[in-house]
Image: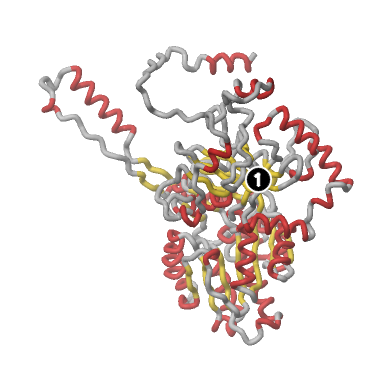
Amino acid sequence: MLRSSRLIVRRGLFNGNKLAKYNENDTSFNHEYSIRPDTFAFKVSGKQVLYNNRISPFQSLKNSKFNMLDFVYRNSTNYPFAEKTPQEVFNSYPPVNSKKLARNKHRPKKVKMAVGDFIEDSLYNPNYGYFSSEVEIFKSDKPFDYNNIEDVDDFMENWRSAYSKYDQEEVEIKRKELIKPDEKNYANPNSKYASYSLTLYNEEKQKLRPVQKNKRSLQLWHTPTELFQPFYGEALAKSIVHKYKTDAKFSGKNLVIYEMGGGNGTLMVNILNYIKLNEPEIYKTAQYKIIEISSQLAIKQYNQALGSKLVAQNLDASKCEIINKSIFEWSETVQDPVFFIALEVFDNFAHDLIRYDNETGEPHQGYVLVDDKGDFYEFFTPELNYYSESFLQLRENGEQGLLGKKNTIKGRWKGFKSSIPFINKDDIHPLHHSRKKLLWHNTILPFKDNLSPGEFIPTRLLHFFHVLQHRFPNHSLVSSDFNFLPSTVEGYYNGPVVQTVLKDRMIDISTYMCNQGYFDIMFATDFQLASDLYRQVTGKTAQVESHKGFLQKWSDLKATNTKRGENPMLEFYTNVSFMTS
């Protein structure tokens, strides 16, 4: 009964509201909200030759032959391109990439781009990208005194207290000013029209008053470096110093550390301070270089890290250099042996999207087409870009190949599992889905043009490994990131988490094709696959460890134990792994 009464209330939500009058002269555009950006997947050719110029089962053409199934879909779905074929639509839009879009001050329309470029542009465009504005990294004013904290629950209370300052520090959002009605403009200032005008003014003034928006409403990152300082950074410093002193390639060389994405500069200070206190001879010639692509954060690092943190710790500011440049535009070759730190950066590396032909298994590269109204659509071509093709070849030739596992007992079980209705199949690779099930599904629901569920592949990570190999050939890598993320976008293998903060609440959405710059797009890293790719590209062997395993080896556990013997630094971030070489 309760459910029924709720339903009645919702149905009567708009009762009493007057219907708007239809205006045939109204030329405003109404977006098609009955379909999602990922409702359709159109298979086309990336070439201009129209050998694939076939109609979609959803479009209505006068000369097409009658087919009952096609007839049903044409009259029950909203094909978005009228009488144009998918190939004609795809050919009519020029291709762009994230590098070209970086010059844009506004979000693009009437273009197409690879999915990887769309994600890259959404996150890193200097004018409207997610990381170009409204970012804040959580930092505590002083390290937590773990030995005087009762347990993990007490630690959480201390964290909330430190976190509360983001409620107290407010950011004023300015709104446009209203023009107050001038009483001189009215013949009778006391008339009902003058009074009504003043009432409207006061109401709008109340609505548009400056908004006090607390900093927690901004995009607030939480990193173990900040949360567990200085002990987390000291653990990395111990690992680096041990490698530096025992690896022959560093013999007679100065210690040089590169860090990608340095945040507030806290890790740099913690590492340099540990080296100064424990290895003063190494510290004398040590250099620390931060590579940061966000100019906003780079300025903050200069002010905070160089201005206050280094001086406060009696560290030499000349040892630090901040390079405001993308690692993917690196042109200098660093031949000397160096350490390269990449913490919490893999998750925001752009991924490309692949779907496989259900009959042949041929991979198709995903594109996002943005029409003249700013709506998004997915297109797929059999022509792969360099890193997509390279990734698929490396994976198949390495230890994580897929094709040979399909006929194993485990592979057959996955195929059977993919046929079971009403269960989540996103953890099953598209090539391991039951072929019969996919073909049958496409016959009944031909929304995806006989293409498999999508797979996001880490092409930017592969590109990063190529940069390390060619620009830092003698590097030693220290990296960590998420190996699992909850609430990923459904319907994709290795799908991302897409989220933003709205009124102090974290909001997840169900598609990556969203207004660029408003949402964080994060991917988990398959570290077994990543280490295999790293080995094939660089020729170096990488060790993968759990977050807890790495810290147990290198951190001062006594310093982070609570009174009851619990250790928040070990118990938090259980979905994080380290990969070092």
Tell me where residue 150 sits by quadrant: bottom right
Report the side of 202 relative to 218 (left or right). left
> Which residue extends farthest right?
409
Q: x, y percentage for residue 385? A: 62, 55
Q: Residue at x 32, y 37 (%)?
A: 209
Q: Quadrant of the N terminus?
A: top right
Q: Please count the marks in the image.
A: 1
Pointer 1 residue = 495
Residue 572, visible in the rendered structure: no
Q: Residue at x 53, y 74 (%)?
A: 332
Is residue 52 shown above or below 4?
A: below
- Given the image, on which type of amino acid does mark 1 rest? Gly
Give whichever of 554, 89 is nearer the camera.
89
Q: x, y percentage for residue 477? A: 65, 69
Q: Residues within 10 Å of mark 1 (few under 14, many from 20)?
A: many
Q: Residue at x 36, y 46 (%)?
A: 172
Q: x, y percentage for residue 96? A: 50, 51
Give whichever of 130, 262 is nearer the camera.
130
Q: Residue at x 49, y 57 (%)?
A: 99
Residue 240, visible in the rendered structure: yes
Give whichever of 266, 507 is nearer the camera.
507
Q: x, y percentage for residue 138? A: 52, 55
Q: Quadrant of the C terminus?
A: bottom right
Local SS, label 1? loop
Report the side of 461 relative to 299 (left or right). right
What colour scheme has been applied to the protein in the rendered image?
Answer: secondary structure
Is residue 162 shown above or below 40?
A: below
